[in-house]
Amino acid sequence: MYWNNLNDNLKAQYGCKVYKLALSSGCSCPNRDGTKGTRGCIFCDGAGAFAESGSISAQIAQAKARVFAKAGADAKYIAYFQSFTNTYAPINVLEPLFLEAIAPQEIAVLSIATRPDCLGADILALLERLNRVKPVWVELGLQTIHPATAAYLRRSYDLPVFDEAVKQLKAIGVTVIVHQILGLPGESPEQMVQTARYIGASGADGIKLHLLHVLRGTDLAEDYLAGKFRTLELDEYIAALEQCVRVLPPRVVIHRLTGDGAKRDLLAPLWSGDKKRVLNAIHGAFLRDDMVQGSAL
């Protein structure tokens, strides 16, 4: 059994567990502000609106306080700009935020979630400058390579845009992490594997594998409640997950094996609300099946 997991990579590099601190840049998204759409992707619940208020330094202090009991005084952290599109603002707004985030000695990595179509030349130049100070990770929400599914999701960019973004980010030495959702409406396990294989061949350094979960208040929830699709059962998810991991090159770091939404808003699948049980089931299946990353390449 082997998969190239993030925790082991970070412990090997920094000698300790590294914790993520969720921060807010205050950015919106072209899929929400009217540039490309107003309702966001179909699964988006607007949770970025929860974002911490105050300066980045204050947000870091608040986030550290939440994990201090288990992290300890000598822990390292990832400054993680997670919600919405965190390169969707002018440089004179973004640069001070990111510099403030990486200023503390205990911040080891700057991680920025964004869209492939929000990486102009000025943004790339900024990321290159920041990467000289501390490692920069850029997370891209691809979710699928299949055009019909992407259109249903209202992703609002085509696959070549993703390809070019990965190429440009790798050219400046930035670490690229790609998100994929398993169980998207209408997709077969074979299609999910095709997406994973594509991500593995794209030049991406890491991947986050998520299951599709349905949250109240989303347009996806309306389709789910209307009976237009069903979500995966746990055994179906694990089977698809194993197939995807087997087609990922061993060099690709797996940042996530699953994902979950806020329990108060979760409609389906309800089994995903018990994260400990889900992870135990995944690890048990990996051991049972002698799951080895890259074994199906």
Image (cartoon, rainbow, N blue to C red):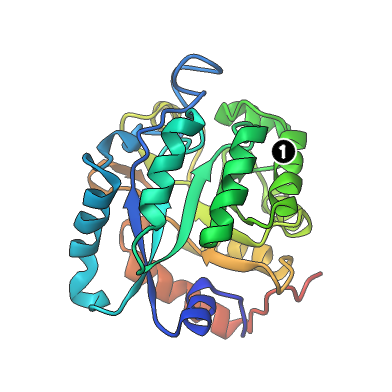
Residue 181 higher or lower than 21, as above or below: above
- How packed mark 1 is, by other alpha carbons closer than 10 Å (few <14, some 14-19, many 20 or more), is some
* Residue located 52% across and 72% down the image: 6
- Residue designated by label 1: 146
Where is residue 116 drawn, in percent x and y?
63, 37
| Relative horizontal placement of residue 46, taking residue 127 as reference (left or right) | left
Residue 208 higher or lower than 253, as above or below: above
The amino acid type of the residue labelled 1 equals: His
* Residue located 53% across and 16% down the image: 35
Tell me if I can see residue 208 in this picture. no
* Residue located 42% across and 26% down the image: 219
Residue 88 higher or lower than 288, as above or below: above
* Residue located 62% across and 50% down the image: 128
Pick the quarter of the image with the C terminus.
bottom right
| Relative horizontal placement of residue 209, taking residue 63 as reference (left or right) | right
Where is residue 45 drawn, in percent x and y?
36, 33
Question: In the image shown, does 18 or 260 lie closer to the viewer?
Answer: 18
Where is residue 234 drawn, in percent x and y?
46, 61
Q: Secondary structure at mark 1?
A: loop
Question: In the image shown, does 19 or 134 lie closer to the viewer?
Answer: 134
